[in-house]
Image: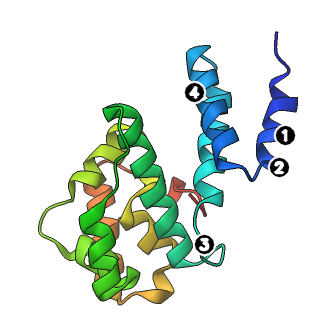
Amino acid sequence: MLDHARIKAQIAACNDPEKLRRWIINARNKNETDISEAAFRRLIAIMPQEQPGTVEDDFWQTIHAFEHILTEERGKTTRLARTRQKVARVGVIETLKDWALRDHHTDGFEMLLERSMPELTGEAIILRHRESFEQIVVEAAGTRLKSAGIDVSTLPDKP
């Protein structure tokens, strides 16, 4: 049997996206979900170029995670072109505000919940960085998560 603790330690120290992607694939092929999850989380943590712990870093972790998931599912490279264009036009904060204040949730919100990743939703990012948003945006984000059955008090401090 593999030494999962040793492998997870190697993953935690890895800064090579390709190596992490291989770990994900190999672990999934062997049904070792804890290893694939650790490699996936490390991959999305190292992808953003922004300062760790910022709204922008959390946002780009979500985008990279979602693109990785869609690429795996579709079998071809998938980029969130419209989201990237919007961010280029109005910025990360305005994009997140728009998502939270919509009268309906985004497709990405639903897809992340289906995959048990509520901490990666734009709404969760807003709640983690509430000081960067107006109160109405924070309330809308919390309401959307609660109405989806998510206990916001259990969301992690980082993705």
Under circle 1, the secondary element is helix
The residue lying toward the viewer, choosing from 81 and 4, is 81
The residue lying toward the viewer, choosing from 152 and 57, is 57
Disc 3 from disc 4: Cα separation: 24 Å
- Going by the numbered disc 4, the residue's amino acid type is Ile
Looking at the image, residue 133 lies above or below residue 55 = below
**Mark 4 — residue?**
25
**Mark 2 — residue?**
13
Disc 3 from disc 1: Cα separation: 23 Å
Q: Can you see residue 117?
A: no
Are the residues flagged by discs 2 and 1 in contact, CB closer than 8 Å? yes
* Mark earlier in primary sequence (3, 2): 2
The label on residue 9 is 1
- Which of discs 3 and 1 lies nearer the camera? The answer is 3
Q: Residues within 10 Å of mark 2 (few under 14, many from 20)?
A: few
* Mark earlier in primary sequence (1, 4): 1
Q: Residues within 10 Å of mark 4 (few under 14, many from 20)?
A: some
**Mark 3 — residue?**
49
- Going by the numbered disc 3, the residue's amino acid type is Gln
